């Protein structure tokens, strides 16, 4: 949790609207965990005003962090116009990342831009347990989108399962269905770590609950501060009146703790 | 004492009996309970911290979404989520007591009685330098805002509180009124030590795709640079109208902004939304005020308070 | 009539008896007398033009500086510089009469009598489609703002005017009040045809080097994107409170902004400060609304007015 | 008077804080007169909100316009970060420029950034009257500043007179003093066209009034619209209650019409 003025050293336009940015930011890179995020200031102007949260995609080299960003609005549009060499105002690493525990049957499930933090997680897990086989389920709308998001997962140890909504790559259909087909009938538990659109996470949570698999999900929301001060990032907790806060209690939550709506 | 060129300007200001080492406080609801910013700033460099609004009982706050960005501002409808008086004292005070600066509790109740109990209990504990009485929260149904728009009710509330606490009482005013000086005057007459202004302007935003309000609460409070001109105007009006100190709040994001409020008559200022944009901005503002004073040859921040030149 | 896919949506709206070809007007004081924008837009594509405020006698306006930029907004203290009623009729009306869209005169007086004379005279001439009664100008001492903050005075003014003009009367409201619905209700009861809101928020800016206000008038009116959330909230409140049409104004800079106001209950909108930023924005907004309707499968803009979904 | 989306084709950093920008903007270039200005939009964000006015420095080639910009605040700071190739949103040419009349004794007086529009004027005048000798008086704080501003005036026909406040180039002192010394005692009238800081223009106006020389001055102010709609750019007129408007009645005024303060 610190503020660091980094420098943009690389900028790749992966698709028309997906951007990969690599920053030198040694202090943040040194302490970042998979599932954590940074708050990026867009510019010096007051519009857009607030920082934007982005998951850490990976920490290539040891003193840099990489983000994968989809252009969806004003702020990300401006990010797309950044040029290599410029300073960037970062706050991070923030939030509670994914659990990495003893070697156990473990799999990752990512949908769309939710795939972003899973690369970092896969790398960390395989670094810690080089002998583990790690099933990674990745889903997206189409091959076009998925190709770039899946880049980097071709590591020894990873068993890649792919599904697209339009069938242009891998299975045709939802990634949760593919997961259920592949592992749902097998005996023994499987721990799941997931990130993706809300409906995907919701049906995954239902699946895991049915199969009695532990499941962690990474949630998104609009954030103002990212550090627990504004209380804006509330998410309803199950079995409780109150709310959890995505920026400090999450973004990674036990799927059982979330009151799915 | 002669002013030596290299000497740092004196930044101390008084809010009633309360001495602040400098005029920069952090605004309620934007700085958590202090601890959240510990990793970013040396809290002891601040003039003070006003903590998140406290109610008698814990409040869960409003349904999400609670926040939306607007042009140079943001709307929030947190709904006064807070841990409640008991847990505040038990869990938050120990850290705050030793954080190296003045700590003020922001309080909010549904009734005069509730405000009074809060004030009384908080006056009994160690480590609080003052109370900021929020009569202006737009985001909760019984959010005190009735007190904030009615001079008579405001007077009665503060008069009642005055009898129940020895701590400096600062009344936080709502900008959503026709004439803010009337409320300021009323609470000054009731015996408070200072007024702070402004709380947020009531606003709204709509998602045109879903045709729904962007906030679950429908409306929310507008803060940030967008509201600075309105805040500055109100501070100037109130500073002329009352004899007690005025604390300026609203869109302050830089030392220049803070100095505008001091010139307009604010004895101190609070930094709110800007903390989210730059967690270090509050201490940068302290340094910037000091530099401005040096460049202007002023030995003392008190010299510039209210020194606006009108020809 | 069946809706054919390719057919353009119907953009017509009514403000009382006044039929507008689309809901996009330009706001008083930001579009001159129409002619100034002739080089940039086809005026006949607009729903209407509200001209710069007119007083009985010419007014020189305030001393400069009259304008200062603020975060996502601007302050102005023009002071109602205008050519006066006589020259307006002689010099400005000939062009406006033939500009291809509805023209509304914005009027402002120091007294009920002055308003009445203005209304009467303007009702006698050809080519005006309606009157917008400004009871909310913050920049002139006798700027009608007394009428704009007092429901009783507002009622009396509009009741008097109602008897003196057959033209559609639109009353332009000030946002600098505790409860804007009260004023809206009062003028609706007095018989006006519509209300338009908001006029500018009163604000201020200071130059910290000279320690002087940035405006010669000290305070000025805040407009632009910064105020949009406040304007939208007030339009929503007023649209629920009165039965007459509401015209939304405040920070509208894009079709998306305009649509937010329509969803909140505005029958039409006015584009102000955004004209300065992009002189073609008003017609771009007309096109953008049409496109939104097509994409939403709506044949008629009236279907979306007030269609905000609240769960 | 039109809106044109131009393109930045050249960007020269002349000094630490003076910038020369060249835009392709054929429609504006075709009709621009010396002394006119353009309103430039800084970015797509709402902050800074308003366009900024800049004098046309020259129209090099026939389809481009060139501006010379000093970084003084937020907007000009952002301009300094623009990159070649980007689109620019221009409105212009605006305002009433300098009079160009029959060949007559005529001279130009410029101070600091006020020199900017005079190059365009000098070129137009000499193009129309190739045999004219045109005295041009240029003043600035120091050689450092003046060098770049005076660039381009080395044309046949121009007699250049230079003064700097610190004496680092040309005469030491005010440019109005130099003008008075050179021409004040000569018989016969001289028409003056000037642009520069307010105090310079004010003392020039006094000088010209004393010598009975016709004098035009170009004034500055904060502008919101630039096209006569907002009435924000008021300047007090002499012998009248009302105000003139710099964007439409000016920026060039007869010095006798201005109520100097
Ligand atoms: C913990 C976390 C990690 C994230 N990681 C990534 C990432 O790795 N890559 C990536 O591309 N994006 C990520 N996001 C989402 C990203 O923050 C938003 O897309 C971004 O803030 C949008 O900014 P904008 O100015 O372009 O959009 P805006 O103009 O602000 O909004 C455009 C649209 O996006 C929605 N939106 C805005 N902010 C968010 C948000 N924080 N979450 C969800 N929806 C939002 C708005 O409601 C609106 O509909 C993450 C969000 C969170 C909370
Ligand atoms: C007709 C005209 C022609 C101009 N030509 C040129 C030119 O050729 N080259 C050039 O560098 N500048 C020129 N200017 C001045 C230029 O418009 C301002 O410097 C610019 O708008 C400042 O923008 P900013 O955002 O950087 O400054 P801001 O942050 O807006 O302000 C910084 C400081 O500059 C002052 N300022 C802002 N705008 C103006 C203005 N329009 N006039 C005077 N002072 C202002 C402010 O009061 C403030 O003190 C011209 C102005 C006018 C009116
Ligand atoms: C997220 C958020 C929460 C807030 N919570 C409180 C609160 O609990 N009590 C209070 O008096 N003011 C609260 N405020 C208002 C601020 O203290 C401040 O008055 C206002 O935001 C204007 O200042 P700014 O523009 O600098 O943010 C809150 C503001 C924000 C943005
Ligand atoms: C420069 C300027 C002049 C204005 N003059 C008038 C006026 O004469 N009469 C009036 O009723 N409103 C006047 N207004 C207010 C606008 O019509 C409008 O209500 C306000 O600016 C809010 O809209 P906006 O944010 O879109 O600009 C003026 C606004 C500006 C910026
Ligand atoms: S984003 Fe501010 S508390 Fe989570
Ligand atoms: S700048 Fe708007 S009238 Fe001149």
Image: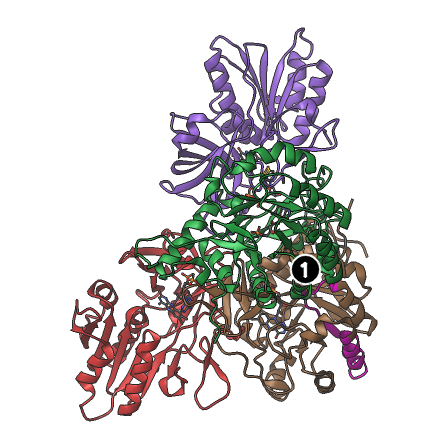
Chain colours: A red, B brown, C green, D purple
* Nearest to the observer: residue C65 or residue B33: C65
Q: Position of residue B265 (x, y in %)?
A: 75, 58
Residue B166 lies in the magenta-colored region = yes
Give the total number of marks visible in the rendering. Answer: 1
Q: Dot 1: within a 10 Å radius of its alpha carbon, few (fewer than 14), some, or many (20 or more) residues? A: many
Indicate the chain on which mark 1 is placed: C
Can see residue B217? yes
> Going by the picture, which residue comes out furthest to the top?
D187
Q: Is residue A26 left or right of residue C140?
A: left
Q: Quadrant of residue A130?
A: bottom left
Q: Is residue B93 left or right of residue A214?
A: right
Ligand 2 quarter of the rendering: top right
Q: Position of residue D132 (x, y in %)?
A: 51, 9
State the residue at coordinates (66%, 7%). D188
Q: Quadrant of residue D23?
A: top left
Q: Position of residue A55 (x, y in %)?
A: 37, 69
Can see residue A102? no
Q: Give the range drawn in magenta.
A: B153-180
State the residue at coordinates (36%, 57%). C294
* Nearest to the observer: residue C153 or residue D12: C153
Q: In which quarter of the image is residue A187?
A: bottom left
Q: Is residue A20 left or right of residue C212?
A: left
State the residue at coordinates (26%, 58%). A15
Secondary element type, mark 1: helix
Q: Mark 1 points at which residue?
A: C187
Q: Where is residue C250 in the image (x, y as percent from the top left)?
A: 57, 55
Tell me: residue B278, above or below residue D196: below
* Nearest to the observer: residue C8 or residue D89: C8
Tell me: residue C102, above or below residue A12: above
Residue D156 lies in the magenta-colored region = no
């Amino acid at each position: 949790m610190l503020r660091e003025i980094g420098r943009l050293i690389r900028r790749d336009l992966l698709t028309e609207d997906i951007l990969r940015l690599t920053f030198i930011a040694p202090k943040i890179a040194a302490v970042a965990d998979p599932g954590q995020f940074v708050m990026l200031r867009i510019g010096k102007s007051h519009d857009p005003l607030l920082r934007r949260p982005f998951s850490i995609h990976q920490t290539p080299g040891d003193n840099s962090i990489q983000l994968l960003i989809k252009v969806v609005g004003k702020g990300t549009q401006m990010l797309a116009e950044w040029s290599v060499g410029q300073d960037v105002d970062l706050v991070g690493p923030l939030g509670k990342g994914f659990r990495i525990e003893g070697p156990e049957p473990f799999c990752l499930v990512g949908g769309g831009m939710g795939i972003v933090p899973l690369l970092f997680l896969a790398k960390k897990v395989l670094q810690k347990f080089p002998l583990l086989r790690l099933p990674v389920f990745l889903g997206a709308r189409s091959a076009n989108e998925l190709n770039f998001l899946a880049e980097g997962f071709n590591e020894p140890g990873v068993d890649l399962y792919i599904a697209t909504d339009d069938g242009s790559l891998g299975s045709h259909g939802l990634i949760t269905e593919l997961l259920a087909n592949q592992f749902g009938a097998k005996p023994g538990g499987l721990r799941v770590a997931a990130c993706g659109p809300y409906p995907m996470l919701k049906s995954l949570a239902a699946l895991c609950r049915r199969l009695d698999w532990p499941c962690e999900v990474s949630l998104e929301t609009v954030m103002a501060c990212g550090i627990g001060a504004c209380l804006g990032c509330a998410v309803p907790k199950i079995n409780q009146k109150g709310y959890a806060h995505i920026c400090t209690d999450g973004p990674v939550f036990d799927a059982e703790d979330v009151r799915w709506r | 004492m002669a002013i030596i060129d290299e000497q740092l300007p004196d930044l101390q200001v008084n809010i009633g009996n309360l001495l602040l080492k400098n005029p920069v406080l952090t605004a309620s609801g934007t700085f958590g309970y202090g601890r959240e910013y510990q990793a970013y700033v040396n809290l002891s460099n601040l003039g003070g911290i006003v903590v998140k609004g406290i109610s008698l009982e814990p409040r869960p706050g409003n349904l999400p979404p609670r926040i939306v960005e607007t042009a140079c501002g943001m709307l929030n409808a947190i709904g006064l989520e807070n841990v409640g008086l008991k847990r505040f004292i038990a869990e938050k005070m120990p850290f705050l007591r030793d954080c190296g600066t003045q700590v003020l509790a922001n309080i909010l109740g549904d009734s005069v009685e509730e405000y009074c109990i809060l004030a009384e209990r908080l006056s009994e504990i160690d480590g609080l330098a003052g109370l900021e009485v929020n009569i202006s929260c737009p985001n909760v149904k019984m959010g005190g805002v009735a007190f904030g728009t009615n001079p008579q009710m405001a007077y009665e509330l503060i008069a009642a509180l005055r009898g129940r606490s020895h701590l400096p009482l600062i009344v936080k005013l709502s900008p959503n009124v026709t004439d803010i000086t009337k409320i300021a005057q009323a609470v000054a007459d009731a015996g408070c030590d200072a007024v702070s202004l402004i709380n947020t302007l009531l606003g709204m935003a709509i998602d045109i795709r879903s045709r729904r309000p962007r906030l679950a609460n429908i409306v929310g409070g507008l803060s940030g640079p967008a509201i600075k001109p309105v805040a500055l105007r109100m501070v100037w009006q109130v500073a002329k109208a009352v004899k007690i100190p005025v604390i300026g709040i609203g869109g302050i994001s830089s030392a220049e902004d803070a100095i505008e409020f001091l010139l307009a008559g604010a004895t101190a200022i609070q930094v709110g939304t800007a903390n989210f944009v730059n967690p270090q901005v509050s201490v940068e503002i302290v340094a910037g005020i000091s530099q401005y004073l040096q460049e202007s040859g002023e030995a003392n921040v008190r010299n510039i308070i209210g020194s606006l030149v009108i020809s």
